[in-house]
Image: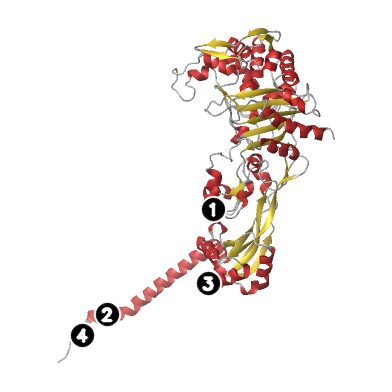
Amino acid sequence: MAIASNPHRSAGLQRQPAILLGLVLLFASAMVLRLGWLQLLHGSENRERADENRIRLLARNPVRGRILDRHGQVLVSSRLIYSLYLQPKDLPQGTWPALRDRLSGLLNIPQKQLEQRKRRGPGKQEYRIELASELTPEQVLRFREQAGDLRGAQVDLDVVRSYPHGSLGAHTLGYTQPITEQEYKVLAKRGYKIRDRIGRIGVEAAYEKHLRGTWGGQMVEVNAMGEIQRVLGDRPSKAGKDLVVTLDLPLQRAAEAALKGKPGGAIVALNPRTGAILALASRPTFDPNFFSKTVTTQREYDALFASPSKPLFSRAMNAYDPGSTWKPVTAFAGMASGKFPPSTKLMTRACITYGGHCFPDHNGAGFGLIGYEDALRFSSNTFYYQIGVGVGSMPLYDAAVKLGFTKPTGIEIGYEESTGLVGNEQWAAKGRTWGKPGTTPWIPEDMASMSIGQSVVQVTPLQLARAYAVFANGGYLITPHLVDRGLDWTAPPRRTKVDIKPSTLATINLGLRKVVQEGTGYAMNQAAELPPVAGKTGTAEDSTGGPDHAWFACFAPYPNGEIVVVAFAQNTPGGGSVHALPMARQVLQVWAQQRSR
């Protein structure tokens, strides 16, 4: 039987080659278009990506600039250490256990430590893992002798910050720390690397740009396995610049020594003419070398950051009740008001009642009829109650502002300082920062306390030193600073004339001199080699409820001061003449020895 042919099927078979050819042409065209898109339109971009996959930049960190004292003595430097690294991309698969055991035996490093470090991963080291740091010369030599058989391991030089004097000047000099991921997002645009370290506080932070330098590195070619094939280029890192600060190493040492044995405190020494800080010490303190360690435990961090003594907290720039060292400010306000001129004499007594409280004189009897000079010499409370209450809170506040209180001093590390407090009627009417406006009025008891630097007055040791510089230099408000920077620190706006009459200055200074000659500061004369000193003792109740503070603020020589020293012993009851004055005397003795050379 004949089978009839299907014309449609034949036509379909005849079209199959054409369809297949069309598909081949379509895919070929797509490939050509894709290749054209990749090579012609995005060729340079893709070549760049290929290079990025093929080329690696091995960064070389810069050496940070040194910090030197005013005589050129090294306060902060950098040192080189050898560290052991694992480069995972250069480690043949499955060879880590053997390499670990080999390194452990060769370098006498526990296998457990090497394993723990490897598990942490590269972290901020990018392409390598730190297995051990601060290798000894013997360990380095052993490694280099066997380096050819230790593929995947490397010993390299690192630069770490070094503080040769330990805790000396720690709050002032500061320390460096690795940058955080959040900081890196911003600082990467300025040339920082994820492995970088940055000044965290003090001079290290304030002069970061000057000290840090710039990164260098090696450009190397790697294969698909990440193994280095050849070096394509080398750019050395650029060291940071050295920085000379105004600190005087012998004076700083004397200040630190004077603070020993105190639960807390601070000493400030500065040049009253220029504002150059010669010593700035705080206690409790810390060793900034802690932050140069490549590995620290959580326990070590907690011991420093969670310590109840707050060793990272600078007492020199924190505010406290100043006590009787504030009385020259009240004297200034009294004479500036015109109500109590320099010739004023007032009757002092056992106590004077303000509001519902009888405010006593410290001797329990008063000192009879006396003027400003003897009131400073005896440190009479009832004399200054009468001056302060008679003037009022706002004129006393204005006098304090003229002497630099209630605002930053201008020091470069000012982001760490408190502006303090000088209470007044307006401040109280606004709620005293803790109450509702109108519910905390200014009362007579406040005015009495304000007059002698208690309760509603808190100042920093640095602010007090700046104010006493006005008395020492003939009436100029200076800017405390740690680096000269080639500026004229005796010219505006860095030094400005205070609106204070010569007669007011002379009266206050004569009173301060009498304090040392025959008053509460007489113990200063135990150091016979000192030039004439003028100053004021202070014993202040701690408004936070702790034991009394001890103060002594002074300048020398009288009447034209060349140095101002403020000594503060936190919660050290017994009086400024007993505790703070000897601290200041120790610093002045070292200064006088240097001055006589």
Residue of label 4:
5
Tag 2 and tag 1, C-beta contact below 8 Å: no
* Secondary structure of the residue carrying numbered label 4: loop
Query: Of label 2 and label 3, which has the lower sequence position?
Result: 2
Q: CA distance from mark 4 to mark 1?
A: 90 Å
Residue 351 sits in which quadrant? Answer: top right
- Could you tell me how far apart the alpha carbons at marks 2 and 1 are, in whole angstroms? 83 Å
Nearest to N terminus: mark 3 or mark 4: 4
The residue indicated by pointer 1 is: 297
Q: Earlier in the sequence, mark 4 or mark 1?
A: 4
Q: In front of the other: label 2 or label 1?
A: 1
Q: Amino acid at mark 4?
A: Ser
The percent coordinates of residue 552 (x first, y second) are 67, 26
Q: Residues within 10 Å of mark 3 (few under 14, many from 20)?
A: few
Q: Secondary structure at mark 2?
A: helix
Query: Which residue is found at the position 63% from the left and 18% from the top?
Result: 399
- Marks 4 and 2, how far apart in space? 11 Å
Residue type (three-letter) at the residue carrying disc 2: Ala
Q: Residue at horizontal 56%, vertical 39%? A: 310
Question: In the rendering, which numbered label is found on residue 97?
Answer: 3
Could you say which quadrant of the image residue 170 lies in? top right
Q: In the rendered structure, which amino acid carries the disc numbered 1?
A: Thr
Disc ID at residue 549? none
- The type of residue carrying mark 3 is Pro
Q: Left of 430 or right of it: where is 134?
A: right
Viewer-proximal residue among 233 and 544: 544
Q: Earlier in the sequence, mark 2 or mark 1?
A: 2
How far across and how far down the image is residue 386, in percent? 60, 10
